[in-house]
Amino acid sequence: MKEVVAGIIKKNNKLLIARRTFPPELKGKWEFPGGKIEKNETPQEGLEREIFEELNMRVYAGENFMSVRHEHSRGPINLLFYWAEWIEGDPILTDHDMVAWVDIDELNQYDFAPADVVVVTKLQLISE
């Protein structure tokens, strides 16, 4: 099963979310950004690299928040969600068409990709 990492990136008590442009079944859906983990990388290293490559931002990846197994159109994936702290940089869009910094209680106003919905629910439960 392919492992993919995503970041719950915090800056000034807000979380970064990004809107996907592909694949077609996820176009327009929001997600916590991230990507593939390369060989000889820890999930945290992969997250830090992916955020820099996709958004031109530097983050510090911290502890694991949760994992979500998901049946993707290209096969099953295990999404590893990590807390991350913004260090520097403003998002430059390459793989997404929009980003937003939002409060946890605003997350349910966005149409998230199926695997991320579980994370949104848990984040809102722990913030109550």
Image: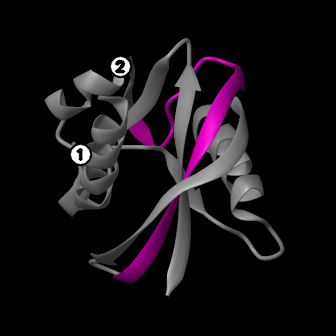
| Magenta stretch secondary structure, dominant | strand
Which of the pair 88/116 is nearer the observer? 116
- Whether residue 89 is visible here, answered yes or no, is yes
Looking at the image, do the residues carrying marks 2 and 1 touch, with CB atoms under 8 Å apart?
no
Which image quadrant: the C terminus? Answer: top left
Residue shown at 24%/50% (left/top)? 27
Question: What's the image's color scheme?
Answer: one colour
Left or right: 35, with 97 as reference point:
right
Disc 2 residue crowd, few under 14, some 14–19, many 20+, Cα 10 Å:
some
Residue that carries the numbered disc 1 in the rendered image: 112
Question: Was residue 13 drawn as part of the magenta stretch in this picture?
Answer: no
Between the C-alphas of marks 2 and 1, the distance is 15 Å
Mark nearer the N terminus (2 vs 1): 2
Residue that carries the numbered disc 2 in the rendered image: 103
Secondary structure of the residue carrying tag 1 is loop
Residue shown at 67%/43% (left/top)? 53
Where residue 58 sits: x, y (%)? 73, 31
Q: Amino acid at mark 2?
A: Asp
Q: Amino acid at mark 1?
A: Phe
Which of the pair 42/38 is nearer the observer? 42
